[in-house]
């Protein structure tokens, strides 16, 4: 498997700097999600994989059966001194529909569920604050409550997806990049934390 990120020229397996942090996002199909996240200044690397299921060493065809319980996930490694975690969450919440349960638009199945697996207490605090603020906006606009799975990464394994999935939309510029979204913005940072 190739380890160099085709856009960021970093190693998708690490090691990364001691100051970097990791977050794992499930936003439906991981191809377009990864592209949105690698474009954020301060992101060191991204990789796509499977997480949140029970099967050891899952592969794409198996995950697509829905029998493993895994979600399609984007690993994001970032430098907190270079990017505000809120900015990552803004891209996460606004670029998929977190109210749809096990689907995103026409993509149906557990692998397309909305998920955040956090690695620090600071992350979980802001994840939950942004979820509450965004859910209020969505419900007031007539949408359903947020169904996003929010959990500590502890005890969960990130299984790297097959090489052809990594930075898929650089390899396939006209490839599938469908993301449902609500069309509503996340409230400003100051409003979220006040």
Image (cartoon, grey):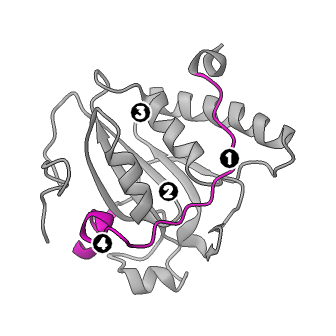
Q: Helix, strand, or loop for circle 2?
A: strand
Percent across and percent down for residue 165 are 30, 71
Q: CA distance from mark 1 to mark 2?
A: 18 Å
Residue 99 drawn above or below residue 118: below
Q: Which mark is residue 172?
A: 4
Residue carrying label 1: 183
Q: Earlier in the sequence, mark 3 or mark 2?
A: 2
Q: Quadrant of residue 67?
A: bottom right
Residue 135 drawn above or below residue 25: above
Q: Earlier in the sequence, mark 2 or mark 4?
A: 2
Q: Quadrant of the N terminus?
A: bottom left
Q: Helix, strand, or loop for circle 3?
A: loop
Q: Which mark is residue 120?
A: 3
Query: Within 10 angstroms of label 2, few (less than 14), some, or many (20 or more) residues?
Result: many
| Circles 1 and 2: CB atoms closer than 8 Å | no
Q: Earlier in the sequence, mark 4 or mark 3?
A: 3
Instruction: Tell whether position 178 is magenta.
Output: yes
Instruction: Tell whether position 13 is magenta.
Output: no
The residue depicted at 56 percent of the width and 35 percent of the height is 127
Number of numbered labels in the structure image: 4
Q: CA distance from mark 4 to mark 3?
A: 34 Å
Instruction: From the image, state whether disc 1 or disc 2 is nearer to you.
Output: 1
**Left-right relation of 130 to 23:** right
The residue depicted at 77 percent of the width and 42 percent of the height is 138
Query: Within 10 angstroms of label 3, few (less than 14), some, or many (20 or more) residues?
Result: few
Q: CA distance from mark 3 to mark 2?
A: 17 Å
Per the rendered image, the range of residues in magenta is 159-188
Residue carrying label 2: 26
């Amino acid at each position: 498997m190739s380890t160099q990120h085709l856009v960021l020229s970093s190693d998708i397996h690490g090691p990364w700097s001691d100051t970097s942090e990791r977050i794992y996002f499930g936003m439906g199909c991981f191809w377009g999600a990864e592209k949105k996240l690698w474009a954020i200044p301060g992101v060191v690397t991204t990789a796509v994989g499977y997480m949140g299921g029970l099967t050891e060493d899952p592969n794409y065809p198996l995950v697509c059966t829905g029998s493993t319980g895994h979600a399609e996930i984007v690993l994001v490694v970032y430098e907190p001194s270079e990017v505000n975690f809120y900015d990552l969450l803004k891209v996460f919440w606004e670029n998929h529909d977190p109210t749809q349960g096990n689907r995103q638009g026409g993509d149906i199945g557990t692998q397309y569920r909305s998920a955040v697996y956090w690695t620090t207490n600071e992350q979980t605090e802001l994840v939950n604050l942004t979820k509450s603020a965004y859910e209020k906006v969505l419900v007031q606009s007539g949408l359903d409550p947020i169904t996003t799975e929010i959990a500590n990464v502890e005890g969960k394994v990130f299984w790297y997806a097959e090489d052809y999935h990594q930075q898929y939309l650089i390899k396939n510029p006209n490839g599938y990049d469908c993301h449902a979204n609500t069309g509503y913005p996340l409230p400003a940072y100051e409003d979220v934390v006040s």
